[in-house]
Amino acid sequence: MKLLFILLLTQLVASMPLFSQYPSDIIFTSQEAINDFKTTYPGCTVINGQVEIRGNEIRSLSGLNEIVSIGNLIISEAENLTTLTD
């Protein structure tokens, strides 16, 4: 019975998202990468490291709207990004 409990607990833990896999530093160079962030890192609301947004293709940050805290933000070469709230 104890072995069955351990196996069930192991299966439960293995099926949970690994919160430690959130990025510590990340560079976005395309709109697609920003749009895919929620799928790649579901539930991620904090990035303690550096986030760099770079590229004229980037027009919207809506794919990052669940982020509430970033350690350091750098935005460069993003002339088509006119607002941080979209």
Image: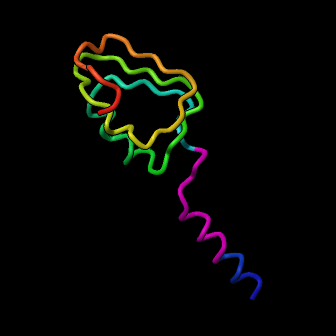
Magenta includes 27? no
Q: Position of residue 68 (x, y in %)?
A: 50, 38
Residue displayed at 27% across by 30% down: 60
Residue displayed at 58% across by 63% down: 14
Residue displayed at 38% across by 40% down: 65
Q: Position of residue 78 (x, y in %)?
A: 29, 15
Give the image quarter of residue 52.
Answer: top left
Residue displayed at 77% across by 84% down: 2
Give the image quarter of residue 3.
Answer: bottom right
Q: Position of residue 57 (x, y in %)?
A: 22, 21
Magenta region: 8-20
Can you name the residue that lies furthest to the bottom here? 1
Magenta includes 16? yes
Decide: is 44 above or below 85: below
- Residue closest to the eye, 7 or 73: 73
Q: Is residue 10 left or right of residue 51?
A: right
The tally of labels here is 0
